[in-house]
Structures are given as C-alpha cells and as structure tokens.
Amino acid sequence: MGHDKSTPPCPVIPKTYKRDDIFLRSHRDIQAVKDHGRRISTALFNLLTCKMAYTPSRVGIVVGRRFGNAVRRNRAKRVFRELVRDSYSELVSGSGILVFPKRDVLLSSRTDLLQAWKTALARMRLLRPD
C-alpha cells in the first residue's frame, strides 16, 4: 500500500505562538527571576516577576516534588500552561514571570483559578491597560 499521489498532504496548522516565545525554559532566565523578582502570594499559587529588558514577556512554571507525584505535577503544569496561552495577549512586554502552583490548584474550578490569575497579574501591573 503506497502513498497515493492524488491525495493532498495533511495541512499544517499554524501555532499562534512559538513555545519558546511564551515560556521561560533556560535555567539562567529562571534563576534571574528567582534572584531579582518581586513575589506575591495567593491561595492557589505564588508569583514572582522581574523586568527583562528588550524581550517579550515569558512565563515559567515551577512545580517541585513536594507538590505530589508526577501525575499531579504534570497536571498542574498543564493547567497553568493553558492559563498562560489564554491570557498571553493581555500581558505587557518585558517581564519574566515565574508561577509556583500550590496543591489546592487541582481542587479549584477553572473560573476561580482564572480570577486569581488575572487579579495577581493586575496587582503586579502585568496586564495591558484597556
């Protein structure tokens, strides 16, 4: 069974953002935010922010082993990645943001988490003015 030349290839779905443009990946960048960032704490997560000149805003998600097993840690990261993708267009540029989820984040509803996320970003002045 070979490839039929008459069938068109699968279309490539363009992504809105590249992975590297949204998320902090390098240890150096994450450590810089940890060393020089300002912290606020909510019931569902801690947030650290630091100015990073001449770059778009990027978000890092840090979940340690104390959070729980690998399934719980990965679930928390997926939840926050979705939040970041949904609200990335509202962020001001030039900031490094680190999120440290707390255990209660997996028990909360999406609306409560979204409300806490937007409130924390507004407190740190990371949302674009309307």
Image (spheres, rainbow, N blue to C red):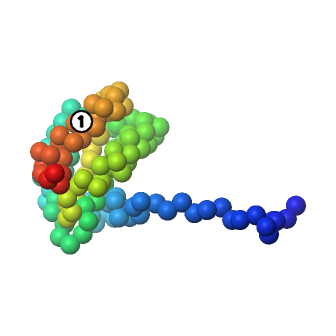
Q: Amino acid at mark 1?
A: Gln
Q: Residue at x 18, y 36 (%)?
A: 42
Q: Secondary structure at mark 1?
A: helix
**Up/down of 120 relative to 127, above or below:** above
- Count of labels in the image: 1
In the displayed orientation, state which residue is furthest to the right: 1
Q: Residue at x 33, y 38 (%)?
A: 66
Quarter of image, res 97: bottom left
Q: Could you tell me residue 20's position as x and y percent?
A: 38, 64
Dot 1, crowdedness within 10 Å: few (<14), some or many (≥20)? few
* Residue 35 visible in this rendered orientation of the protein: no
Residue at (28%, 37%) from the top-left corner?
A: 114
Residue beneath disc 1: 115
Q: Nearer the viewer, residue 14 or 104?
A: 14
Instruction: Left or right? Give the position of 71 relative to 104.
Output: right
Question: With respect to residue 110, does 33 lie above or below?
Answer: below
Where is residue 115, by image quadrant?
top left
The answer to whether one can see residue 38 in this image is: yes
Give above or below for 84 relative to 53.
Answer: above
At 69% from the left and 65% from the top, the residue drawn is: 9
Given residues 119 and 30, the one toward you in this image is 119
